[in-house]
Amino acid sequence: MYKRTTKNSVRKEIYITAAVFVFIFVGMIVYLISFMRNDSKEFIYNSYNSRFSVFADDVTRGGIYTADGIEIAKTEKNNDGKEVRVYPDDRLFSHAVGYVDKGMSGLEAQYSFELLKTHITLDEQINNSLTGSKSPGDSLYTTFDYNTQKAAYEGLKMFKGAAIAIEPDTGKIVSMVSMPDYNPNTIAEKWDEINDESNNNSVLLNRATNGAYPPGSTFKIITTLAYLRATGSDDFSYNCKGNYKVDDYTIHCSSNEVHGKEDLTKAFSNSCNSAYASIGVDLDREQFIETANNLLFNQTLPTLLKSTRKSTFKLDENTKDSIVAQTAIGQGETLVSPLHMCMIVSAIANNGNLMKPYMADKIVSANGEIVSQTEPESYGVILSENEVNLLNSYMEAVVTDGTAEKVNFGDLTVYGKTGTAEYTTNKKLTHSWFVGYAEDEYGKQLAVAVIMESAGYGSKYAAPLAADIFNAYFDK
Amino acid sequence: MVNVLTTFSRITILSYIIIFTVIDLVQIFEYKLNETVASILATIQAVMIVLFLCNSSIVLYYAKEDPKILALMLFQLMFLAAFGIIINNITLPASKGVINNILLMLCFSFVFLERLNMARAIRQFIFVVVATFASILGVYILRKITKINQYMMLFALLGIISLLLVSVLGKVEYGAKLSITMGSISIQPSEFVKLSYLFFIAGCIVTWKDFRGFLIAGLGAALHVIVLVFSKDLGTASIFLATYVFLIFIAYKNYIVLTLELLLATLGGLFAYNYFPHIRTRFIAWSDPLSVIDDKGYQISQSLFAIGTGGWFGSGLTKGMPNKIPVVIKDFIFAAIAEEMGTIVAICVIVIYMCTAIMLFNVAFNCTYSFYMLVVSGFAIIFTVQTILNIGGVIKFIPSTGVTLPFISYGGSSLVSTMFGFMIAACSNDLWRVPERPRRRARY
C-alpha cells in the first residue's frame, strides 16, 4: 500500500496536464496583446471611460492641422484662465474635425487619446512637472487641403448635402463637407436647440460618411459593370424611344427625350434610363448582386474612419421586373453614402486598386518630431484593367459629349457621371449628384462625390461644384 | 517631483519584473540546473523582489504622503526575510523558484492594496503573517498523522457539510453565496474545502487504486460540485470539476475517460447556459460588454478601459483610476496592475503564474509518495484553473466567473488555503509518515 512510485515515466500525464494549461496561458497572453493592438481603442475612446480627465491635468490638448499646415483646432486659455477648445474657421471643418464639448465626435473623438499624449523630451517633461506647468500634447496633421475644403464648403453652403474628395492613389480624404452644419465653437450653448425634437435638420449627422441617398443615375456605373461582367463584352445596341415599359410600369428618359439608336457609350453619356432599364431586366440577378457586393454594397466600407454607413442594395430571385428596372437606374431600394460613391470612382481612377480612405495623416510632437504616420493601405484590386479602360471611356464621354458637356472643367481631363435622383413620389423633387475624377497634365488625380439635396439636375448644380473643387485642388 | 519619480519608476519597476520573469523561465528547469546556478538565479530574483517592493512603496509614499506606507514596508521586508529563513529551516523546500514567486505575488498584493485601500492593505498584511504561521503549524500537524489517506471520508464529509452550510446560511454577494459572516469576520469555506477535497480524492485513489477509487471519488466530487452550483458559485464549481477530471487522468492515465469527462463537462456547461439566466447574462456581458455597459457589462468594460488606457507601459502608480472598477481589490486587481504598471508587466505577471504552475507540477512529478504526488498535482490544477478563470475574466478572454487571483487579491480565507497548499507542496517529501521506517529525505 505504501509502495513508492518513483518511476518518472509513469507520471508523464502530469506534464500532459501542465501542457494543456501552458497552452491556455499562452493563449491568454496572445489574446491580451491582440486586444492592446487592435481592440483597445474601441474601449479607450468610449464616452464612459472617465480616464481622459486625468491626462488633461498634465497635458494641454494638442492642435489639429490641415495637410498644408493651417491650424483648424487649438486649445487656448480664455479670460478666466480656463482652457477652451477653439476652431479658428468656425464651421468649415465641423463634421470632419468634430467637437470636444458634449461628448466628442469626429477626429477629436477618434484621436483624443493621441492629442492628450506628449512626446516632448524627458527633461522638458521633468522641467514642466517641477514648475507645475502643463506639457504640450501631440498635434494631429490631417489629410485635408484647406483651399479645396473651402471651395467645397462655399459651393455647398446654400444646400443640404455633402461633398467629399479623395486622392485615388493614397486614399487621403482631401475635403469633406456635410450640410447643414454646426459651429463647433458654440456647440455647448446650442446643444439643446440642436437636439430639440422639432429640429429635423440632423445637423450632427455627417452626411458624407453616414448619409443614405438614392444614387440615381450615378448607379449606372455599377449597372454598366454588371453588364460587362455578365456578357463578357461591351457589345450593346438599343433603340431608345423615350420610355421603357415593364409589367405595367413605364420608365421615362429624362424630359422624355428620345435618344434613338445607342451603343453603351451613348447610353451611358446620355444617361438613358430606357436603355439601362432594359439592361437591368435582362441581367442575371445573381450576377447583378455579386457585382454590387464586389463594389462594397451591403458591407462595412473598408476605411480607416471610425464610423461609416453600410450602403444597401436589395435584389433577389422574386424581385419584380419593374423594381429591377428601377434598381438598374439607381432608384428602387438602393441607398448609398457619398463616401461610397467616391471610393468607387477613386478605384476606377487608380486602375481598379481601391485605397482605404483616411483623414489622419500623422501625429507630430510639439518639437516637430513625427510620432506616428499613417501608411496608405490598399483594400485590393476590385476592377480589371479592361473594365477600368471601358468605364474611363464612358465617363469621359459624359463630360465631352454627354450630360455634363456644358460644365466648364477648365484644362483638366475629367471622367464622371451625373445623377438626378428622385427621392419621393414627387418627380419634380430631385437630388443633384456628380461623381467622377479629374486628372491634370502631370497625372495627378482627385476623385469627388457631390450630392445636393432637392437641387435638381446633376449637371446643373453638382457638376459645377465638382469643377470648383477640382480647380481649387489643382490650382495649388 | 512626484511626477518625475512616478514616470521614472515605471521604467525601473518594469525592469525588475522583466529580469525576474526571464529568470523564472529558466528556473522552471530547476531540477535539471546546476545547484550553484540555480541558487545564484534565486538570489537575483530575491533582490528584484526587494527592489520592487521598496521602489513601489517609495512612489506610493510620496504620492499619498502617508508614513504608514514606509512603516508597512519595513514590516514587509522583515516578513520576506523571516519567510525565507523559516522555510529553509523546517524543510528542504521542494522548489526554491516557487518560494520566490509566492513572495513576489505577495508584494504585488501589498503594493496594490496600499494603493487602492490602505485599511484593507494593513488587514491583508496581518492575514499574510497569520496564514504563514497557520500553514507551518498545519504542516507540523500533517507530519504527525500516519496513513492520512484513510481519513478520506472524513474530509469528504467536512467539505460537503461546510459547502451546504454556506448554501443555507451564506449571504448573497454579486449573485452567488460565497461566505458566512460571524461578527466582523467573514469566512469563505469553499477556499478550505479546496484542500479537504484534494485529500479526499487522493485518499480514494491511493487506498483502492482501482475502479472503486475512481467511482467513490467521482461521487464525492459530484456532491461537492452540485452543492456549489446550488449556491451559484460557478467559478469554484468549475475549479472542482476540472481538478477531479485531471487528477483522475493523472492517476489512471486513461484518455478515453478523460475525453468522456470533458464531453460530459461541456454538456453540463451547455445545460447550465440554457437553464440559468445569470449565466446567459454573463455570456452577453462577455461577448459584447459595451452593449450592456449600463448594467451587466459595466465591470468588464471598466476593466478594459483601465487596461487599454494604461497602455503597454502603464499610467504609473497612483496615476490611473483603478478604483472606478467595481470589486477591484478582489476579482479585478489584475486590471489595476495592468493599468498602472502597464500591459508588459501584466504579461510578465501571467508568465510568472504560468511558471509557478509548472514548478508545482515539477514538485508533483518529483514527489516520493504517490498520495502527495496527487495532492500537489491537484493543488497545482486548482491554482492554475483559478488563475486562468480570474485573469481570463478580467481581460475578457473568457466570461467572468468571480474567483480571486491567488495571493494578490484581497481576502483572508483564500490566502490561508493557498498558502497552506504551497507549504504542503514545499514540504511534500517530509510529510508522509510511514510507521516502522525511518523518515526519508528528498534526493537532494
Image (cartoon, grey):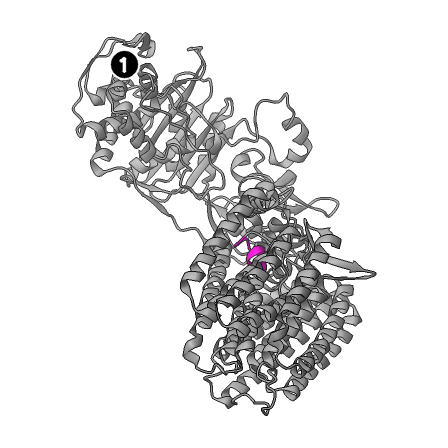
In the displayed image of the protein, which residue is found farthest to the bottom?
Answer: B438
Query: Which residue is pictured at 47% across the width and 85% down the height?
Result: B33
Most common secondary structure along the magenta stretch: helix
- Find residue B131 and report its horizontal and vertical position in percent: 71, 73
In the rendered image, the quadrant that contains the C terminus of chain A is: top left
Give amino acid for label 1: Ser
- Image quadrant in which you'd find residue A325: top left
* Foreground residue among B326 and B19: B326
Query: Which residue is pictured at 64% across the width and 23% down the height?
Result: A197
* Foreground residue among B221 and A347: B221
- Chain letter of disc 1 in the image: A
- Image quadrant in which you'd find residue B380: bottom right
- Find residue B6 and report its horizontal and vertical position in percent: 66, 67
Q: Is residue A131 visible?
A: no
Q: Secondary structure at mark 1?
A: helix
When the figure is inspected, residue A122 is found, relative to residue B326, above or below; the finding is: below
Circle 1: is it few (<14), some (14-19), or many (20+) Cα within 10 Å? Answer: many
- Point out the stretch of residues depicted in magenta: B389-398
- Find residue B304 and report its horizontal and vertical position in percent: 58, 52
Whether residue B24 sits left or right of residue B71 in the image: it is left
Whether residue B69 sits left or right of residue A170 in the image: it is right
What residue is disc 1 on? A274
Query: Which residue is pictured at 56% across the width and 89% down the height?
Result: B441
* Foreground residue among B191 and A5: A5
Whether residue A340 sits left or right of residue B56 in the image: it is left
When the figure is inspected, residue B238 is found, relative to residue A155, above or below; the finding is: below
Any magenta on residue B393? yes
- Image quadrant in which you'd find residue A124: bottom right
Any magenta on residue B408? no
In the displayed image of the protein, which residue is found farthest to the right?
Answer: B183
